[in-house]
Image (spheres, coloured by chain):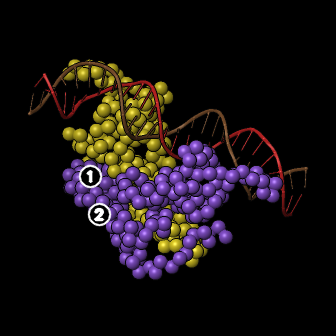
Chain colours: A purple, B yellow, C brown, D red
DNA sequence: TAGCGCATGTAATATGTTACATGATTTC
DNA sequence: GAAATCATGTAACATATTACATGCGCTA
């Protein structure tokens, strides 16, 4: 997932590995905060795969390697972004994608979040059937993890439902997050 | 984490790798559902480290390797269980521990969950300060991930608060989850 | 001149998944 | 007799962390 997050940052401006680490700390650390040990190899691989280009330069006596996304990179990033969210993969994946939804037309973002809510609802139905069976059989702690899972999904459903409403209210005021690092 | 979940299952009865996979599917799949490719090597390692013992046998013509936890294993499992929950590590770790809290004295479980709530509250305070700064600066999608993180923590706090109350009401009716596989 | 922030990178380790290989028994 | 289920295991791959190694420039 880190490669897509990196591409997402590069969609916006050219960055070094060090920059990326700083920006993550300030913006995505809630759901993703990678170490240099994964950022640098990821950049390396992205370049080998032809999704980014790098320029070596010396600034204030410091050796820097500035990366920029190219057309190939933009294509794979947008493809990832437009894919429906598989919310069972990981809770972080949802956040990662939504974080970059500003790159999508508003209608597409709305559509994807609507689909997410539908998928969550399906899973809720599934778990509710399981709940009946297990509640009678398990102890309070074992049952609690299932009920937590269920309540957690209900929380997510309600949250994204509300988010959709806020989204429709939003004027789309152009407020790019580039401001963060200024 | 898988090693502790395996030890937790073995606390209750002797099992084969195959059994463990089945039980996971029925009980913990909500937060952990490992593949054979991680269960078998994990069992192997647990045995090499001296936490479990295995007995090879042939039952109904099928070769089986039944694992049982030993004193060393019980010690490391209980030590893991009694440790305060680091809820920032992963959301799954909370569930994994609470799932086995039936092995703890009720007061210890209560204490650990109380501490968890305190830790979550601390993090909420932290994020609320960040929120003020970022809200003005980020676009709706970027801000949403932070707000989701915050609301998510508030959900967890409320949930475990309520769970504590339910726990105090609970008679502690002995309802071991062994019933699941019957 | 010591230490911190900037800046890049590697090596060892951990942890897990998917796919494959193998072979027995049970069920239709 | 074919397919599903029981049962164990390995190999290739993916993904990430921690700790280390290196070195420059700025500031106290």
Residue B104 appears in the picture as rendered:
yes
State left or right for residue C16 relative to residue A22.
Answer: left
> What chain does badge 2 belong to?
A
The percent position of residue B160, horizontal first and vertical second, equals 40, 62
State left or right for residue A121 relative to residue B139.
Answer: left
The percent position of residue B148, horizontal first and vertical second, equals 45, 67
Do discs 2 and 1 belong to a common subunit?
no
Residue lying at 55% horizontally and 75% vertically, measured from the top left: A175
Asked where in the image residue A135 lies, by quadrant, the reply is bottom left
Image quadrant for the C terminus of chain B?
top left
Q: Which residue is mark 1?
A: B173
Q: Nearer the viewer, residue B130 or A179?
A: A179
Image quadrant for the N terminus of chain B?
top left
Residue B115 appears in the picture as rendered:
no
Count of labels in the image: 2
The percent position of residue A36, horizontal first and vertical second, equals 63, 49
Residue lying at 78% horizontally and 57% vertically, measured from the top left: A59
Q: Nearer the viewer, residue B80 or D15?
A: D15
Q: Residues within 10 Å of mark 2 (few under 14, many from 20)?
A: few
Q: Regarding mark 2 in the picture, which secondary structure is present there?
A: helix
Tell me if residue A109 comes above or below residue B181 in the rendering: below
Give the distance between the C-alpha atoms of the residues marked 2 and 1, in whole angstroms: 37 Å
Tell me if residue A39 comes above or below residue A22 in the rendering: above
Q: Which residue is mark 2?
A: A118
State left or right for residue B13 relative to residue A77.
Answer: left
């Amino acid at each position: 997932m880190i490669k897509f997050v990196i591409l997402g940052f590069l969609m916006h401006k050219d960055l070094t590995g060090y920059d990326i680490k700083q920006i993550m700390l300030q913006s995505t650390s809630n759901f993703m905060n990678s170490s240099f040990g994964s950022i640098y190899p990821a950049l390396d691989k992205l370049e080998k795969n032809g999704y980014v280009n790098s320029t070596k330069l010396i600034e204030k006596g410091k050796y820097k390697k500035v990366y920029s996304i190219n057309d190939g990179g933009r294509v794979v990033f947008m493809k990832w972004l437009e894919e429906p969210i598989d919310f069972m993969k990981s809770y972080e994946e949802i956040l990662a994608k939504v974080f970059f939804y500003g790159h999508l037309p508003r209608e597409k973002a709305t559509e994807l979040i609507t689909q997410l809510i539908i998928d969550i609802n399906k899973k809720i139905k599934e778990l509710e059937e399981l709940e009946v069976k297990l509640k009678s059989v398990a102890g309070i702690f074992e049952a609690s993890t299932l009920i937590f899972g269920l309540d957690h999904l209900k929380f997510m459903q309600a949250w994204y439902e509300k988010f959709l409403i806020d989204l429709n209210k939003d004027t789309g005021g152009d407020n790019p997050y580039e401001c963060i690092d200024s």
